[in-house]
Image (tube, grey):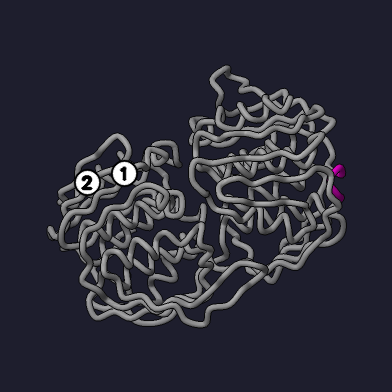
Amino acid sequence: MLVEPAHSLKGEVNIPGDKSISHRSVMFGALADGLTEVTHFLQGADCLSTISCFRKLGIEIENTPERILIHGRGLHGLRPYDSMLDVGNSGTTIRLISGILAGQTFPSALNGDSSIQKRPMKRIITPLREMGADIFGLNGNDCAPLKINGSPLHAVDYQSPVASAQVKSCVLLAGLYADGPTSVTEPSLSRNHTELMLSSFGARLSSHDTTATIWPDPLLKGQKIEVPGDISSAAYFIAAGLLVPNSELLIRNVGINPTRDGILRAAMAMNADITKLNIHETSGEPVCDLLVKSSELTGTTISGDLIPALIDEIPVIAVMAAYAQGTTIIKDAAELKVKESNRIETIVTNLKAMGADVTAEDDGMVIHGGKQLHHALIHTCQDHRIAMSFAVAALCSQGGAEIADAECVDISYPNFYRDFKKLKCL
């Protein structure tokens, strides 16, 4: 995909549904009694992998352009699948479903693509084993493919070494099948969609500071869920609207959950002109429209407790930093190394190819902004967030950029390039 420079961006964009919430709507709907109806579901490859896995576990799921209908069978209604469940590229699918399968009465096996087979699963294997689960990597390396022999689970108070919604959610979902209340304490608060949505389905769950506690064996009831727009997908349009001169974009229906809105806080620290309009709630999640105008960005430091609230947006924040005046320091973000690619390495390599002054650190990077970026071939490493971030980088560069393996955006935003074209970006 060749992305050419843009002189101005104008218009509105409706971004696709939130990926995290879409995953959870299928999983929790499957474990509930009765019908769950989901609108504005993200039809990306990752979320379709979740649908596929639960269909194989005996759940009837109707996928239409208007809505997803999940015919739940209750907490103990899943059926064994006699082959390998394929999660594709989805880390959310494999980590969350492992918590559910650990408490079943039957064995399961999980695998995914080559990227999934490299991603660390010890972070869920350890707490699940503490609960009495029989889970292990079939290749002996604590990675997929995973084998899970369902077994009775015990309540734990797990102290997680990482702030990860996937780890937290895995343990809480296993806690549905435990013999008492199960708690997870994180070093800082990760996204809380699991806590919010499970509570709406009828689970007994409490949250205090960075600890979430769930009580076992609830009666979950099917719900109607309207998925808000994904702030991670909105981030590319936020960055584009800020960077391209003479631009004004209205980004509609964006979820602004405070455990996810780090991109907005980072952008405001960089002198961004962003206004929240029409603030309201959708299915218990705060939502608004964002009015974004061209801004003269300045460098900042992004670290500490802010990192979990913007970990997926760091690639596009790094692009913003390359065009900002001054130095931006990103640290405490070693988690970037175990995403779909080693994002520290991938970001730094591609920014340098475009002429940016950037240095990799063990847990982040230092970017000295203000240099004119130029045309380059962007190697995405099949990472959807790298592809979309460097499409934004191309907009203000000399000569644009060529995005290799550009179709990897289908993981989270199948219509990304189409929506950019509407704003005269391509």
* Residue 133 percent location from the top left of the image: 72, 26
* Residue 253 percent location from the top left of the image: 53, 74
Residue 334 is drawn in which quadrant?
top left
65 relative to 144 in the view: left or right = right
Q: Is residue 371 visible?
A: yes
Q: Residue at x 39, y 49 (%)?
A: 405
Residue holding disc 2: 366
- Amino acid, disc 1: Lys
Q: Which residues are magenta?
A: 73-77
The quadrant the N terminus occupies is bottom left
- Amino acid, disc 2: Val
Q: Is residue 284 above or below residue 102?
A: below
124 relative to 3 in the view: left or right = right
Q: Earlier in the sequence, mark 2 or mark 1?
A: 1
* Residue 350 percent location from the top left of the image: 25, 47
Residue 264 is drawn in which quadrant?
bottom left
Say whether residue 362 is magenta: no
Q: Secondary structure at mark 1?
A: loop
Q: Is residue 384 visible?
A: no
Q: Main secondary structure of the magenta part?
A: loop
Q: Residue at x 42, y 54 (%)?
A: 310
Q: Which of the pair 410/284 is nearer the observer?
A: 284
* Residue 419 percent location from the top left of the image: 44, 71
Q: Residue at x 67, y 25 (%)?
A: 130
Res 331 label:
1
The quadrant the C terminus occupies is bottom left
**What residue occupies the far left of the structure in this picture?**
371
Within-10-Å neighbours for mark 1: few <14, some 14–19, many 20+: some
Q: Residue at x 68, y 36 (%)?
A: 98
Q: Which of the pair 258/283 is nearer the observer?
A: 258
